[in-house]
Image (cartoon, rainbow, N blue to C red):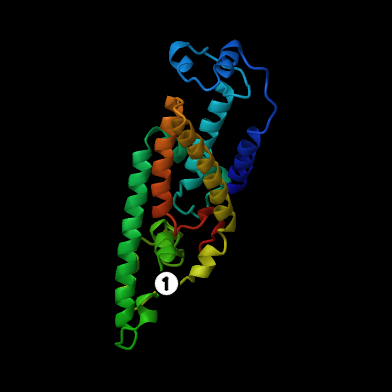
Amino acid sequence: MSTGAIALSLLSLSFHFTSAAPPTPLESQLLAANGNKTVLNSEIAPAWATTSNIRSTASLLWTCVLTLSICVYTVIHINVPPPNETQCRYFLRKTKWVVVTILAPELALTMALQQWSAARALKRELNSIYSRYSDGKVDVAAAKKFSMAYCFYAVMGGLVVDVSDIHDTHSLLTFQPSGIVRLAEKGHFIEISEKTIKDKSKADILAKSLVCVQVCWMVIQCIGRKAAGLPISLLEIHVLVHVACALCMYALWIEVSLPLAIESN
């Protein structure tokens, strides 16, 4: 699904270079004011401003809605899909979290913080246990055996085991962090290389990079308008708040690879 985010980002950037319609009477008055911003406080803007060289309602809505959508869709990392889940169900599950994040970004930020905290705790416990099984010696290699990428993968339900030969009802079970720790305490470690996890996330990195370009473009526009003494719409302020939350989630989920591209073994 990152391909869609890439296409939307490129489409949004190209929107700024489209042809403009003739200015409205109010826009002509603003141009005639030649930098006098008091006209913005004395004149009432129309409910819908047509596309022009100054600023239009359509371009404002397009930029804000598209930036918000692709930013939220790209930053959200839901749990690794189970083996029997189709791409359609995965898309619907992620769309549900996108809607939740748009309506209440603090909930998604809390989820990201909880997963980061669980992955950090799991990493600390696994490396501590692994160091005790390394011939009684604690070395640098043993202390860094399990990375945050591995622990995020485990916390998000990526470790699945086939139990069809020992269970009558369930054929597949997902390891929880507590179960992984219990196995490690018995000397059994589930090892997956970090390269195996991260090699599948190149498209995810590209999508996030393009989203960052789009977000930076909008932030620069808002800073420029504020520096010039021009008003900023409430919609832009709302999107900037979402962007701030998204940046925090980016930081917490920076070690998370693209879940859909990873096959559970």
118 or 237: which is nearer to us? 237
Residue visible at 55% across and 45% down? 213
Q: How many marks?
A: 1
Relative to 137, residue 79 above or below: above
Q: Give the percent coordinates (x, y) of residue 174.
A: 41, 59
Left or right relative to 173: residue 49: right
Q: Give the percent coordinates (x, y) of residue 32.
A: 58, 16
Determine which quarter of the picture holds residue 202: bottom right
Answer yes or no: is residue 250 visible. Answer: yes
Q: Give the percent coordinates (x, y) of residue 207.
A: 57, 49
Residue visible at 47% across and 54% down? 80
Relative to 261, residue 141 above or below: below
Residue beneath label 1, please? 190
21 or 185: which is nearer to us? 21
User: Of helix, strand and loop, which one carries label 1?
Assistant: loop
Count residues near mark 1 (Cα–Cα under 10 Å), then give few for <14, some for 14-19, many for 20+. few
Relative to 51, residue 74 above or below: below
Residue visible at 35% across and 47% down? 111
Left or right relative to 106: residue 23: right
Residue type (three-letter) at the residue carrying disc 1: Ile
Q: Give the percent coordinates (x, y) of residue 54.
A: 59, 24
188 or 154: which is nearer to us? 154
Answer yes or no: is residue 186 visible. Answer: no
Relative to 70, residue 148 above or below: below
Determine which quarter of the picture holds residue 133: bottom left
Residue visible at 68% across and 20% down? 21
Name of the residue lying farthest toward the right: 19
